[in-house]
Amino acid sequence: KKIKEIIGDERELHVQVVAPSVSGMIDEAHKIVDEVGKDVYIKVPTTLDGLEVMKKLKAEGIRVTATAIYTEFQGYQAINVGADYLAPYYNRMLNQNIDSAEVIRNLAKRINLDNSNTKILAASFHNVAQVNEALSNGAQAVTVGPDIVASAF
């Protein structure tokens, strides 16, 4: 709640649920929305349980960010349940020998083909070149640490 007060209403706040069960994640999401406000995005891991949670939260009108995306298939499923944002983990994909740029590019294509309102919020970067590559391949937003920002100048 304090972070939301600091950043104001014109900026988005994404808050992660951490419970291991569907009911626990839903309870945490409701608590976050009750305490922070309806304009918060609930970050839910893109697992089978997470997809169930996302679908239920979206049916309630709660905003959702699908996190921990490593594959196109995960992203496609999150788009299908109505996630507002997809958070593909760029550097973590590279560490698993997955072509991060291609995943983002294909997710962006799917979003366009489906006329979806889902956006790509790429995360987990090791350097500015990765950020640039994510943005040039279709990510609309990125989340980066201060070290990455500082290294850009």
Image (spheres, helix red, strand yellow):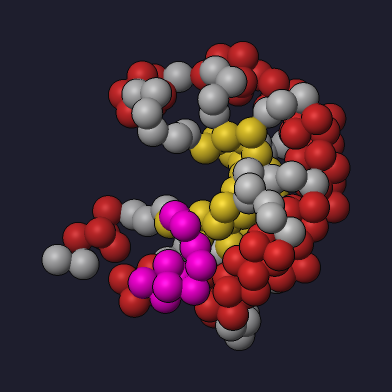
Give the side of residue 141 with respect to residue 59, left or right: left
Quadrant of the image for the C terminus? bottom left
The residue sitting at 64% across, 70% down in the picture is: 109
The residue sitting at 73% across, 59% down in the picture is: 114
Residue 92 position by quadrant: bottom right
The residue sitting at 33% across, 28% down in the picture is: 7
The outermost residue toward the top is: 34
Q: Is residue 108 magenta?
A: no
Give the side of residue 40 with respect to residue 52, left or right: left
Residue 66 visible in the shown view: no
Q: Toward the viewer: 48 or 78?
A: 78
Q: Toward the viewer: 113 or 140?
A: 113
Q: Position of residue 91 (x, y in %)?
A: 49, 72
Q: Position of residue 124 (x, y in %)?
A: 47, 62
Question: Which residues are drawn in magenta?
Answer: 132-141
Q: How many marks?
A: 0
123 to 18, vertically: above or below: below
Residue 44 position by quadrant: top right
